[in-house]
Image: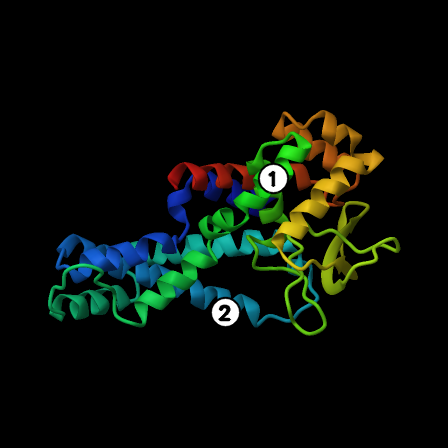
Amino acid sequence: MAIGDLMGASAASPALAIDGRGLVPLGRRAAAGSPDAIDAAAAQFESLFLGMVLDGMRRTKLDGGFGDSGEMQLFEQMFDRQIAQGIAGGRGLGLARLLAEQLRRMPAVAGEGALPAAAQPAGEAAAAGSPAGFVREVMPHAKRAAGALGVSPLVLVAQAALESGWGERLPRRADGSTSFNVFGIKAGRAWAGERAAARTVEYENGLPVGQDAEFRAYPDLAAAFDDYARLIATDPRYAGARAGSGDAARYFAELQSAGYATDPAYAEKAARVLDRVRAEVDDA
């Protein structure tokens, strides 16, 4: 699948993605008067701004299409970030130049220093919703759940990222609050907890079909990871996944074979997201 190939390219080249982590530190150096940091911070902000614009355009599309699955939205997000980085890395829109000029007119300050108010909140927000931010947020829970299953924590982080679009596409309760269901676990008849309804995509005879479904809702991320670990550890159909827990590729393949997901490319997609997770951990 072409979009899957793009995902693989992005996973192998972390520099293609917009990373808000570096914006605030760059802002501190820029405020201290570093010319190189001023140009870098301005270019990073323009990339960030373009990414937000593209994401906003995606969100205005009609709901209910095949592109509403967490997996497809994850690929769309990474595609948009690559486009934004490419535009900003070329001639750009001129925003970086204007911002750099503004920063150069500001007096140098010691200590914390910062970008203009409009840039700093944007950088902090992007960092919170970025792949790096998602990894940091879920890693403690992934380590605990992974210990119970005998898998690498990175494997669980990757699966959660794939299912939830790096935490940005979660089923929501009727009141609009998040379900914290980062693993896309549906609420069957035996589920006695809270529920959250969402539009999803299932594959029938290899073709995607849009469906309305109910998903399990949790009080927090800890409960979501604990429930996932309990499901995989106790359900007989995931015996193969448990047996292959020491190998990420086999673990994903066994989950797919057992019916965890109906997407015929699920294991391949999970493996590609795992590459991205590993890159984020290496860069941390």
Disc 2 on helix, strand or loop? helix
Determine which of the numbered discs, if any, sits on residue 56 in the image: 2
Q: Quadrant of the C terminus?
A: top left
Residue 232 shows in this picture: yes
| Amino acid on which the number 1 mark rests in the picture | Arg
Query: Which residue bears the numbered disc 1?
Result: 144
Looking at the picture, does residue 284 appear above or below residue 253? Answer: below
Please tell me which residue lies in front, 79 or 241.
241
Please tell me which residue lies in front, 176 or 143.
143
Asked if the residue at tag 2 contacts the one at tag 1, i.e. Cβ–Cβ closer than 8 Å, the answer is no
Looking at the picture, does residue 46 appear above or below residue 159? Answer: below
| Amino acid on which the number 2 mark rests in the picture | Gly
Expressed as whole percent of the image width and height from the top left, the position of residue 224 reads 67, 51
Alpha carbon of mark 1 to alpha carbon of mark 2: how far? 35 Å
Q: Residue at x 67, y 34 (%)?
A: 148
Query: Does residue 32 appear left or right of residue 221 in this picture?
Result: left
Q: Residue at x 55, y 48 (%)?
A: 138
Q: Quadrant of residue 165?
A: bottom right
Query: Does residue 189 appear left or right of residue 209 in this picture?
Result: right
Q: Extreme right residue here? A: 189
Disc 1 on helix, strand or loop? helix
Expressed as whole percent of the image width and height from the top left, the position of residue 80 reads 47, 57
Q: Residue at x 76, y 52 (%)?
A: 202
Q: Quadrant of residue 38?
A: bottom left
Looking at the picture, does residue 236 appear above or below residue 175? Answer: above
Looking at the image, is mark 1 or mark 2 earlier in the sequence? 2
Expressed as whole percent of the image width and height from the top left, the position of residue 183 reads 67, 49
Residue 210 shows in this picture: no
Looking at the picture, does residue 52 appear above or below residue 227? Answer: below
Dot 1 alpha-carbon crowd within 10 angstroms: few under 14, some 14 to 19, many 20 or more: some
Please tell me which residue lies in front, 66 or 150.
150
